[in-house]
Image (tube, rainbow, N blue to C red):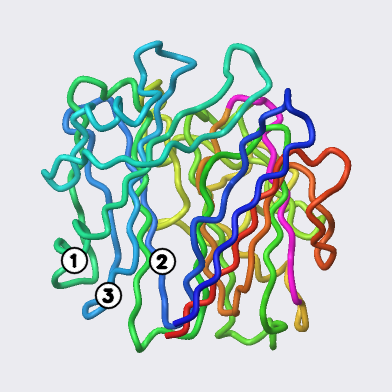
Amino acid sequence: MKNIILCLTVCLYASSVNAVLNPVDIWTGNVGLSIDAVGSNSSPVGDIQANIPAGATVLAAYLYSAGIPSAYSNSPTTLADYNGAGITLAGTGITNYDTLVGASSPRANIGNWYTGRADVTSLVSSLATTGPNYSWSVDKTALNNKIDGEVLAIVYELASLPEASVTLLDGGQHTDGETTVVNFDTALSDTSDPAFFAEMSLGISFSTAGNQVSHVDVNGDRLTSSAGGYDDGVLANGGLITAGGLGDSTANPGNPFDSSAADDELYNLSPFLDTGDTSFSMLTSNPSDDDNIFLMGLYITADIGSVVTGPTIPAPGALLLGGLGMSSVSFLRRRRML
């Protein structure tokens, strides 16, 4: 096994602090990805789903809880807040939130989101005993309506799966726009092959759709103008959560410029990729500056070598850590030899 991880932050303007979707890790081999979300103001909140094939090994599992501090002054903003919030998964208290992520908005009445992330790999491994389909309860006691919902992202390995790469990015998009460049160690082979797939999932909170939507461009072409909503929750503060994953379709919006088009935050990137590509770029933005894009998942039958993110970064193939307007850059390279 060979692992190389490098994270770099470049601050060109001391007064400007922008969130970025930081690459958490890259898993390459016979790997798969399960993502689901749940949100409500009921108690318990509801059930969150997982799909892990029988016999698979759980490589990583993360539980995200998306607070809404711009709506409630007592919504969690620290790790201590989350660890004391009484959040449970399958009846087990989650008290090991160790990372705060969340988007950043230039609007003074919005500011930063503080979304808690907990490593629940051991718990999920103990729960995933038969497969493939699981349903686990989520509860949040006193702070239920102060947290929009939970997202569970699971990466697993099974020898019978096709060779692929999974990468998770979290931390929070800057709502004014952020670019992600994905680089392949090997150029894409036949992207028209039915066995080829390239899927992207977004996890978004505090979005109602309608006039609160996000845009995504891939290689300069519009993928969607209607990312967001409360597909996995309810239309109320404390339930505004959606994540592309289980039960969703990879069919892209028919009119990518229609902000009211049906969108479940799960996308097929294949139409934007060509045989021979060595990288591709994605630009995500939230024109209303009030949605929290805190998670991106990519699952591709390709060999992802590195991921670079930042509000403004060079075009694919020119990965220089510098440039006008770049306030921060996150770079990750990981090779997992299975």
Judge whether 180 appears above or below 150 on screen: below
Mark 3 vs mark 2, foreground winner is 3
Select label 1 or label 3 by which is in front: 3
Magenta-colored span? 278-290
Q: x and y percent of residue 28 in the render?
A: 49, 77
Q: Which residue is mark 2?
A: 33
Residue 113: x and y, percent?
50, 27
The disc placed on residue 296 is none
Look at label 3 and name its amino acid: Thr
Residue type marked 1 = Ala
The residue singled out by tag 3 in the image is 57
Marks 1 and 3 sit apart, C-alpha to C-alpha, by: 9 Å
Q: Residue at x 34, y 31 (%)?
A: 79
Q: Earlier in the sequence, mark 1 or mark 3?
A: 3
The residue positioned 75% from the left and 44% from the top of the image is 257
Q: Quadrant of the N terminus?
A: bottom left
- The image shows a total of numbered marks equal to 3
Instruction: Check disc 3 and report its element: helix, strand or loop.
Output: strand
Taking depth in this image into account, of 127 and 238 the one nearest to the observer is 127
Three-letter amino acid code at disc 2?
Leu
For label 1, the residue is 128
Magenta stretch holds residue 198: no
**x, y percentage for residue 295?**
50, 47
Depth check, front residue: 261 or 4:
4
Q: Residues within 10 Å of mark 3 (few under 14, many from 20)?
A: some
Q: Are marks 2 and 1 in contact (CB under 8 Å)?
A: no
Between discs 3 and 2, the one toward the N terminus = 2
In terms of image quadrants, where is residue 20? top right
Residue displayed at 34% across by 13% down: 74
Q: Counting residues from the N terminus, which is met first, the one under dot 2 or under dot 1?
A: 2
